[in-house]
């Protein structure tokens, strides 16, 4: 009962604060001409979105971090400081993503184009953030007297595989890859917010699928933060969007999602419940690879995949609905058969 009250309180606080901050932030972003630039290579009808305020992710980052810190304090008081550290580092990784996104968005606005940091610059910053996250989590395990992180759990087949020192290479690629996948999902109105809201429901529900007498607080609080942030932002981001979260918001959410699965010590599960994120990245990689192999032919009408569906005539609302429904089904599958 206490855990459920904490969950509801955290979710409502983040939701209400996000709505209120968004309402105040949008006019400020407009007055400072912080509008989104639309690439000429994108769908031509997206040109009408140009000038829509971006960097709106600030509206949910502030309450999410403050409520997250409060949650860490609650866990530290009830279960000890060490028990709160995985959630602390998850918030840290999300904040690193948000900071990288803010630098990128600021550069885009300064250059008045849709290209901010170069790909190598962004990748280097993300690798650095992921490295710091893994180092912190390794120190938590060491301080707790646990063995080093060398094993990866494979859900559904219920086995652990020891990768030795290569664990950190795999973990680094997964951390950076998922963060960027969530970033790619933010391509049409409400898509990233809706899919990530469902991911938040997964984290919250997973807290009740534990063997303990009470639900685990860390995934419960993380779920509350994701649900409150995304639901509050959707008030202004659902089609037709009045504000975009920008890389500031999407990289923050990506950091929380992938940090959350590492916190649960079940990192590969994100490939299942977060399949839409992975599909976005896979579509880009397949498009580029096919284009080079065939000397100019395209596998999809446009990548990432949500633009392909747009070119097929799907409305943005339909794409969001399908992506959210798929994420909901795969989240249920993950809850029933994928948890440790």
Image: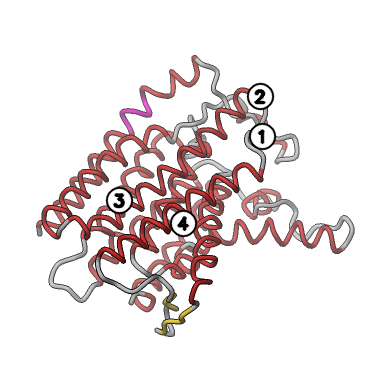
What residue is rendered at 55% in x and 50% in y?
A: 185
Left or right position of 195 against 121 = left
Q: CA distance from mark 3 to mark 2?
A: 35 Å
Q: Is residue 91 magenta?
A: no
Q: Which residues are magenta?
A: 19-23
The residue at which mark 1 appears reads as 115
Q: Nearer the viewer, residue 199 or 173?
A: 173
Q: Position of residue 88 (x, y in %)?
A: 30, 51
Give above or below for 111 relative to 266.
above
Q: CA distance from mark 4 to mark 2?
A: 34 Å
Give above or below for 156 relative to 189.
below
Badge 4 or badge 2: first in the primary sequence: 2
Secondary structure beneath label 2: helix
Q: Quadrant of the image for the N terminus?
A: bottom left
Circle 4/circle 2 CB separation < 8 Å: no
Badge 3 or badge 1: first in the primary sequence: 3
Q: CA distance from mark 3 to mark 1?
A: 32 Å
Badge 4 or badge 3: first in the primary sequence: 3
Circle on res. 111:
2
Circle on res. 231:
none
């Amino acid at each position: 009962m206490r855990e459920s009250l904490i969950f509801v309180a955290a979710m409502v606080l983040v939701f209400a604060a996000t709505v209120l901050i968004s309402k105040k932030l949008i006019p400020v972003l407009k007055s400072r001409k912080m509008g989104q630039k639309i690439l000429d290579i994108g769908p031509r009808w997206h040109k009408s979105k140009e000038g829509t305020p971006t960097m709106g992710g600030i509206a949910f980052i502030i309450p999410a971090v403050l409520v997250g810190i409060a949650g860490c304090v609650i866990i530290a008081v009830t279960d000890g400081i060490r028990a709160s550290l995985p959630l602390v580092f998850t918030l840290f990784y999300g904040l690193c993503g948000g900071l990288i996104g803010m630098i990128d968005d600021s550069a885009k606005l300064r250059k008045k184009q849709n290209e901010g940091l170069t790909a190598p610059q962004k990748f280097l910053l993300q690798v650095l953030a992921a490295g710091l996250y893994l180092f912190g989590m390794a120190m938590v395990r060491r301080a707790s007297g646990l063995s080093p992180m060398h094993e990866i759990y494979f859900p559904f087949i219920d086995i652990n595989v020891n990768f030795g020192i290569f664990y950190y290479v795999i973990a680094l690629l997964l951390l950076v890859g998922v963060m960027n996948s969530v970033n790619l999902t933010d391509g049409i109105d409400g898509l990233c917010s809706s899919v990530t809201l469902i991911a938040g429901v997964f984290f919250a529900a997973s807290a009740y699928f534990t063997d303990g007498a009470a639900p685990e607080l860390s995934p419960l609080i993380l779920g509350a933060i994701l649900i409150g942030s995304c639901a509050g932002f959707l008030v202004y981001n659902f089609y037709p969007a009045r504000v975009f979260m920008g890389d500031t918001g999407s990289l923050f959410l990506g950091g929380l999602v992938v940090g959350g699965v590492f916190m649960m010590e079940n990192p590969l599960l994100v490939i299942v419940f977060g399949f839409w994120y992975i599909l976005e990245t896979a579509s880009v990689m397949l498009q580029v690879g096919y284009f080079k192999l065939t000397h100019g032919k395209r596998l999809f009408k446009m990548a990432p995949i949500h633009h392909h569906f747009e070119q097929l005539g799907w409305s943005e609302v339909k794409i969001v609905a399908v992506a959210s429904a798929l994420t909901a089904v795969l989240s249920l599958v993950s809850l029933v058969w994928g948890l440790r």
